[in-house]
Image (cartoon, rainbow, N blue to C red):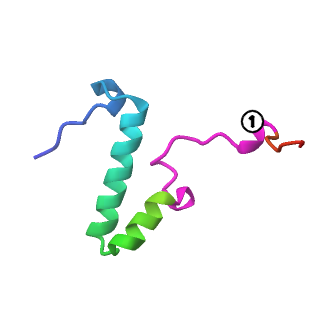
Amino acid sequence: MARKPTKALEDQGYSKLDSYCIGLNEFYKSLRKSGFGESIALYLITEPGAYPAWLLPNQVPPEKFGDYEDDD
């Protein structure tokens, strides 16, 4: 039986933050299901470089915000 296509999370009333957190949770559960230990799975969800490109929205490069070094 074919599954119905689901609406995007934002279309279901979730905020962008809700969508982000749901994505993190799903990523963690998938890592655990595929055999990663708890500590490795937690490390991977805290390391943005490990995320698949389609999981998170495009991030803004830090250079766009300017230089934040103190001149003291």
- What number of labels is visible? 1
Tell me residue 2's x, y (percent): 15, 44
Disc 1 target residue: 65
Horizontal placement of 10 versus 53: left or right?
Answer: left
Q: In the image shown, does 6 or 49 lie closer to the viewer?
A: 49
Residue at image point 34% right, 66% down: 31
Residue at image point 45% right, 48% down: 55
Quarter of image, res 29: bottom left
> Which quadrant, please, contains the C terminus?
top right
Which residues are drawn in magenta?
A: 47-66
Please identify the residue farthest to the right as the structure is shown. Answer: 71
Residue at image point 26% right, 68% down: 33
Residue 36 drawn above or below residue 4 = below
Whether residue 8 appears in this view of the structure is: no
The secondary element bearing badge 1 is classed as helix
Quarter of image, res 3: top left
Horizontal placement of 66 versus 19: left or right?
Answer: right
The answer to if 55 sits in the magenta stretch is yes
Residue at image point 49% right, 45% down: 56
